[in-house]
């Protein structure tokens, strides 16, 4: 009498199916989206470094390409399964950033990279490209407005008391007044051989800061000149 065979598949069959070679077209499509996502993320990093005023922002910008690639991979996995997508929501709810993000602009760029990854993972490359184009226009426009905005600033000049704080033509206060910038003198004192001038500059255009400092360095070559944006102190 023959022994009946168990119709259930062997326990290793699901594992073998999981490692079965996928369709070549699927692999090529995913590879193209990953490469495109990496290139777009590098452009986002370049745009952020071009317009950001944060000197330490590159520590955040370095993760843009990797974040985009991971988002593409995750979206490619969960887009065909509702159960996986719900499980992903629960898994991401316990993820926390250990590094403090002080500038909201950095958080917006992180969401931009996630948006690019979601678009490419959902096989919508034109959505990612349009998103990048529109975001670039707004970022450059806002950066242009910020460079033309007028803000207060503080200027400090420290130099030789005999040469720059006397009655000669190189008097520090007279040189600063000759620049034509509205200002309020906060301190002008001499201590021994050293003098110090501190003024509050009113309604200075951000783009003129470098020109102003260069002019003062040329006319007061022996002085230490410090320029601080008042907005940076708030």
Image: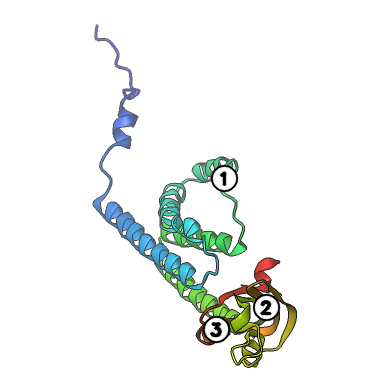
Looking at the rendering, which quadrant does residue 161 occupy? bottom right
Q: Position of residue 66 (x, y in %)?
A: 41, 53
Image quadrant in which you'd find residue 38: bottom left
List x then y, in percent, for residue 113: 48, 60
Q: CA distance from mark 3 to mark 2?
A: 12 Å
* Quadrant where the image shows the N terminus: top left
Identify the residue at image location x=42%, y=68%.
46
Q: Secondary structure at mark 3?
A: loop
Element carrying mark 1:
loop
Q: Secondary structure at mark 2?
A: strand
Q: Residues within 10 Å of mark 2 (few under 14, many from 20)?
A: many
> N-terminal of the two: label 3 or label 2?
2
Q: Earlier along the polypeptide chain: callout 2 or callout 1? A: 1
- Mark 3 or 1: in front is 3
Name which of mark 3 and mark 1 comes first in the sequence.
1
Q: Is there a contact, CB below 8 Å, between mark 3 and mark 1?
A: no
Q: In front: 19, or 171?
A: 171
Residue 127 image position (x, y, % from top left): 45, 68
Q: Which residue is mark 1?
A: 98
Which residue, given by chain and number where applicable, does mark 3 sit on? 220
Image depth: mark 2 or mark 1 in front:
2
Classify 10 Å Cα crowding around label 1: few (below 14), some (14-19), many (20 and above). few
> In the rendered image, which residue does mark 2 sit on?
197
Nearer-the-camera pick, 107 or 72? 107
């Amino acid at each position: 009498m023959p022994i009946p065979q168990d119709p259930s598949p062997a326990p290793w069959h699901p594992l073998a199916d999981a490692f079965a070679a996928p369709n070549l077209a699927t692999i090529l499509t995913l590879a193209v989206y990953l490469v495109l996502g990496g290139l777009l993320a590098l452009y986002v990093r370049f745009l952020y470094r071009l317009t950001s005023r944060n000197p330490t922002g590159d520590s955040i910008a370095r993760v843009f390409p990797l974040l985009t690639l991971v988002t593409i991979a995750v979206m490619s996995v969960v887009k065909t399964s509702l159960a996986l997508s719900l499980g992903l929501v629960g898994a991401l709810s316990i993820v926390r950033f250990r590094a403090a993000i002080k500038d909201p602009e950095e958080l917006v760029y992180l969401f931009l990279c996630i948006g690019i990854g979601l678009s490419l993972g959902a096989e919508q490359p034109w959505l990612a490209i349009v998103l990048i184009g529109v975001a670039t226009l707004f970022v450059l426009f806002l950066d242009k407005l910020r460079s033309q905005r007028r803000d207060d600033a503080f200027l400090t000049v420290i130099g030789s008391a005999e040469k720059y704080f006397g009655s000669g033509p190189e008097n520090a206060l007279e040189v600063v007044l000759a620049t034509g910038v509205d200002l309020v003198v906060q301190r002008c004192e001499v201590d021994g051989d050293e003098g110090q001038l501190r003024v509050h500059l009113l309604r200075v255009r951000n783009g003129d800061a470098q020109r102003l400092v260069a002019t003062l360095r040329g006319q007061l070559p022996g002085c230490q000149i410090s320029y601080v944006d008042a907005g940076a102190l708030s």
